[in-house]
């Protein structure tokens, strides 16, 4: 242990390979549903003895690196909506700054149970929905896939054709995104587990677009929080480097897998992950 820092990373030759593997797995699974991966990594680290004050910065490191890796793949698939992403990110980043500043005063037990409750609500909302909100339209072809220039909406490829979409209830969505940013800054989980359901269930954005846009934008939210953590001296070089290596590989893998899954399958995967995370959080509180 480093004297005066309270660090648990006194044996990087043992901890680093395990952390690389854990980060890679979490980033891959998180990228499938646009959850960011840190929602899995942070509880895992806390459950294995890492203080929450050290796990939170590592979670944001994973989110930022995984976003860079997975986001590029989603861009090639034209499933990212930049205009929507920038719009919601303004609210999320503001919340992330406030959350990072508040992270040193919030009781860990309160935060853990709050995260578990939010995860379960998001799982029920996404997993219980049936049917397709944005049906394929015969007037839209492969050339229309992507975002529409000058508008927040766009079109997404799905089984049976190409479906147009337009985000709804934008004010409510922005309010929820600020909460996602706040949670991200406080806990280091990235906020993607809130962003993706918000875009899909509140704003009626196709889940494939919601997950891809969330993966692309959570890195920005994480970077804002990391600036505060860096100023507080809470980012350690060795574990951060290990997380980056794992998350880049995992982010690319998850993005490739997500692009081959149908929307209902992605919703179920997200719901299952969120339930597992809620259980992990409660049992490790």
Image (cartoon, rainbow, N blue to C red):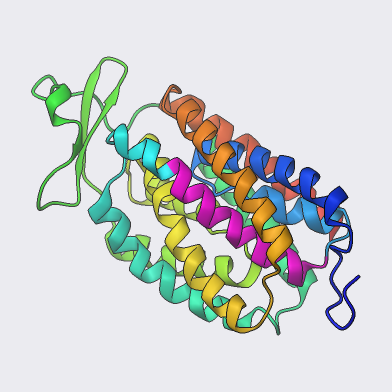
Expressed as whole percent of the image width and height from the top left, the position of residue 112 reads: 74, 63
Q: Is residue 273 left or right of residue 190?
A: right
On-image quarter of the N terminus:
bottom right
- Residue 281's place in the image compared with 75, above or below, is below
On-image quarter of the C terminus:
bottom right
Expressed as whole percent of the image width and height from the top left, the position of residue 230 reads: 60, 77
Q: Quadrant of residue 124?
A: top right
Q: Residue at x 85, y 54 (%)?
A: 47
Expressed as whole percent of the image width and height from the top left, the position of residue 205 reads: 32, 43
Q: Nearer the viewer, residue 66 or 1?
A: 1
Of all residues, the one furthest to the front in this rendering is 13
Q: Quadrant of residue 232?
A: bottom right
Helix, strand or loop: magenta stretch: helix
Q: Is residue 104 left or right of residue 210?
A: right
- Can the viewer see residue 123? yes
Q: Quadrant of residue 27?
A: top right
- Can the viewer see residue 189? no
Expressed as whole percent of the image width and height from the top left, the position of residue 174 reads: 35, 65
Q: Nearer the viewer, residue 169 or 40?
A: 40
Queried whether the magenta region covers residue 207, the answer comes back as no
Residue interval drawn in magenta: 51-70
Q: Is residue 28 left or right of residue 212?
A: right
């Amino acid at each position: 242990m480093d004297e005066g820092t309270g660090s648990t990373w006194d044996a990087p030759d043992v901890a680093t390979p395990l952390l690389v593997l854990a980060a890679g797995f979490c980033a891959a699974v998180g990228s499938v549903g646009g959850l960011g991966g840190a929602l899995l990594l942070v509880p895992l680290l806390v459950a294995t003895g890492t203080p929450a004050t050290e796990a939170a910065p590592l979670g944001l490191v994973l989110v930022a690196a995984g976003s860079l890796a997975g986001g590029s793949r989603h861009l090639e698939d034209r499933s990212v909506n930049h205009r929507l992403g920038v719009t919601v990110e303004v609210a999320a980043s503001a919340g992330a700054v406030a959350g990072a500043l508040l992270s040193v005063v919030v009781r860990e037990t309160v935060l853990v149970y709050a995260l578990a409750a939010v995860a379960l609500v998001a799982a029920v909302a996404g997993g219980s929905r049936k049917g397709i909100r944005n049906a394929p339209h015969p007037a839209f072809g492969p050339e229309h896939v992507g975002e529409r220039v000058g508008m927040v909406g766009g079109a997404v490829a799905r089984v049976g054709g190409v479906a147009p979409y337009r985000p709804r209830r934008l004010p409510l969505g922005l309010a929820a995104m600020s909460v996602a940013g706040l949670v991200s800054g406080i806990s280091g989980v990235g906020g993607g587990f809130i962003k993706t359901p918000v875009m899909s269930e509140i704003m009626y954005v196709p889940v494939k677009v919601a997950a891809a846009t969330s993966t692309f934008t959570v890195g920005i939210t994480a970077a804002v929080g990391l600036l505060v953590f860096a100023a507080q001296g809470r980012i350690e070089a060795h574990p951060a480097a290990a997380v980056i290596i794992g998350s880049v590989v995992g982010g690319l893998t998850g993005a490739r897998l997500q692009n081959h899954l149908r929307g209902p399958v992605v919703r179920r995967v997200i719901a299952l992950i969120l339930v597992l995370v809620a259980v992990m959080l409660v049992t490790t509180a």
